[in-house]
Image (spheres, helix red, strand yellow):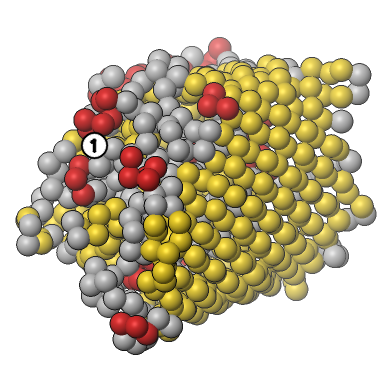
Amino acid sequence: MKISYFVIFILAFGANSVAQTDNIQTVTIDSIIIKASRLTESQLILPIASTKLNILKTQNVRQQLSLNDYLQEVPGLFVQNANNFSQDMRVSVRGFGSRSAFGIRGIKILVDGIPETTPDGQGQIDNLNLGILKNIEVIRGPSAALYGNASGGVISIETLNEVDSLFFKGGITAGSYDLQRYQLLSGFKLGKTTYILEGNHTKTNGYRDQSGFSNYNVNARLVSELSETSKINFHINYTDSPIAEDAGGLTLEELNADRRQARQRNIDFNTEESIRQFKIGTSFNHEFTEKITFTTYGFYSHRDFDGKLPFEFGGVIDLGRNYFGNGSSINLKAEKNTLQVGYDWAIQNDKRLRYRNIEGLQGAVTLNQLETFSTFGFFAVDHLSLGDFLIRTGARYDSNTLKVGDDFLDNGDDSGSINLNSFNPSLGLTYKLNQNTSLFTGFSTSFETPTLSELSANPLDIGGFNEDLKPQKARNFEIGYRHKNNMQYFEAVLFYIKTDDDLVPFEIEAFPDRTFFRNAGSTNRKGLELSYLRQLTNNVSLTSSYTFSDFKYDSYGIPSGDFNGNALPVVPKHKGLVSLLYQNEKLTAKIEGNYIGSLYTNDANSVEVGGYTLVNLNFGYKFMLGKQVLQPFLGVNNLFNTEYNDNIRINAFGGRYYEAAPGFNVFGGLRIQF
């Protein structure tokens, strides 16, 4: 599908549906409130590019295996690696996060207002149960004035927190590649306190050889109204993922020979990971008066990680992480002005050990060090309303201290510390043309330190940190238009981002399969983001989005090449989505088409991967059996069996860029509530 036809289809379909408004019964599109912007505001007047996703509408017909399934419609956001559970899903927002070797990097992740992203900017969501999602908010662009380090974008997730009466819900899902998923969910209310308990188990053999995955997850949440002015939220999460295998990257020749094969070296070294994570968190909100509100949160998380990589020296990893923090803020409201001031404080301790990988067996220790990242950030955000204008200003100062204590002294003592402090301002302006339409513009910044794992990956093959790495900085300028009425919502945003010292992954011949990082001068990122939602009839709704990304290196040269003017790898120039949802009291049916344009695999732009179109289907039916509600469901992924890559390994040595994605595959199951 040519992208020009894709865009014409969206716009023509939208224009045609608008012209036929008189033939459609009025169905109100919900008001869109964005909480992730620190000061809760209607999306119509917020001078920040944002998207809010209502998950509950289609939750019961989803596979609930990857967060990617929920994020497809967000413009400016691109996901890879949704099927490699060892490397974890890689999310990029306007290019931020695209370089991540594993996990979510440079994007702030919040769950029920509590950070999932570590102070150094690394995030995983393998402990998140997708079956209890309620909604997702995405701020599409640099947001360091709001959330500090590694806020190239923000993904704020809210889980279920309301119960009308006692319920029990069970579910079973089965699918291609021996997918099995079992879920139990219960909720009840005693007085003014709501309790939600959930547990699930997921396993799959994976599409490729050596790509199996198993996960156990338990969640408990308590929400209590202590008084008319006070509310407390408390939750506990435990996750045990005993195995997540890594099939590795293939060359083009290997890919064409057998898409499902694992790289032989990954088999030889038994590449896989296992994690165990415990997290406890609480938040408290109190209204002193209608104009003064206080909010605070606190949390503690412990994570044990064991991994095997496909090389001998340092190829076995043993990581123990303790991560805890607290934040508070106070809101002061006046007639035309709202001010929020607050702080966020957190400490991350990583005990990192590396051993030799002797064909899958642990050998002698090669690295033993304690890495610490402590951060304290103070911020202020202000909204000033002047007639039809809203002026939003923000500023934040972060003090970041990184320390490493070298406990492996055979090659010398490489202990040390680094201070990476930052000041980040932001400014936004909205002009409300009428009650349904607004124009907005804004300036924002981001500051991204290297993660502890990136700093400890030293190409000099010594302990301590790679002190040559510098933080990545960005300045974002955007202008947008929004229109919302009872039947439709439309948003268009143009943006320009200037970055300095981009952190870029690479591999070298001396250490094959190991990822290192370097700074890459500067980039220019220009883009367009379109969103259009339309209620076509009482039962049929349209969702569509389109992203144009022109991201290029402005200044980047290394001894092996000059990359000035080259496109950033693994970011498609074009990305689009169209989906139709039919829903009545019993039946839910959804068809979704995604177009992903071509992209490059490396900084040299010497290898290009072509674009592709994916079509997915979901069906669900609800009926009563006595007092029980039964909901059978069925889904088809990649309906037309398109061959594409689930992940591209950036700058991989030897051309091992490709990780094949599943072809046509199905899933189905039954959910029952009583």
Query: At 76% from the left edge and 55% from the top edge, which residue is drawn?
Result: 221
Taking the image as drawn, is residue 25 in sight? yes
In the picture, the quarter occupied by the N terminus is top left
Placement of the C terminus among the 4 image quadrants: top right
Q: Is residue 79 above or below residue 326?
A: above
The one nearer the camera, 209 or 430, is: 209
Label count reads 1
Which one is in front, 256 or 120?
Answer: 256
Measured as percent of width and height from the top left, residue 458 is found at 28, 70
> Residue 302, position in %: x, y?
61, 67
Q: Residue at x 62, y 59 (%)?
A: 277
- As drawn, is 193 to the left or to the right of 453? right
Circle 1 sits on which residue?
251
The residue at the far top in this view is: 23
507 or 499, nearer to the observer: 507
Residue at image x 41%, y 69%? 364
What residue do we see at 56% from left, 12% from top? 23
x, y percent for residue 325: 59, 74
Camera-nearest residue between 150 and 508: 508
Q: Is residue 659 above or below residue 308?
A: above
Q: Quadrant of residue 399?
A: bottom left
Q: Is residue 250 left or right of residue 655?
A: right
> What residue type is disc 1 on?
Thr
> Is 399 displayed left or right of 651 in the figure?
right
Helix, strand or loop for disc 1? loop
Q: Is residue 611 visible?
A: no
> Which picture quadrant has residue 255?
top left
Near mark 1 (Cα within 10 A), the count class, few <14, some 14-19 or many ≥20, is some
368 sits left or right of 256 in the view = right
Residue 605 location (% of width, % of height): 14, 43
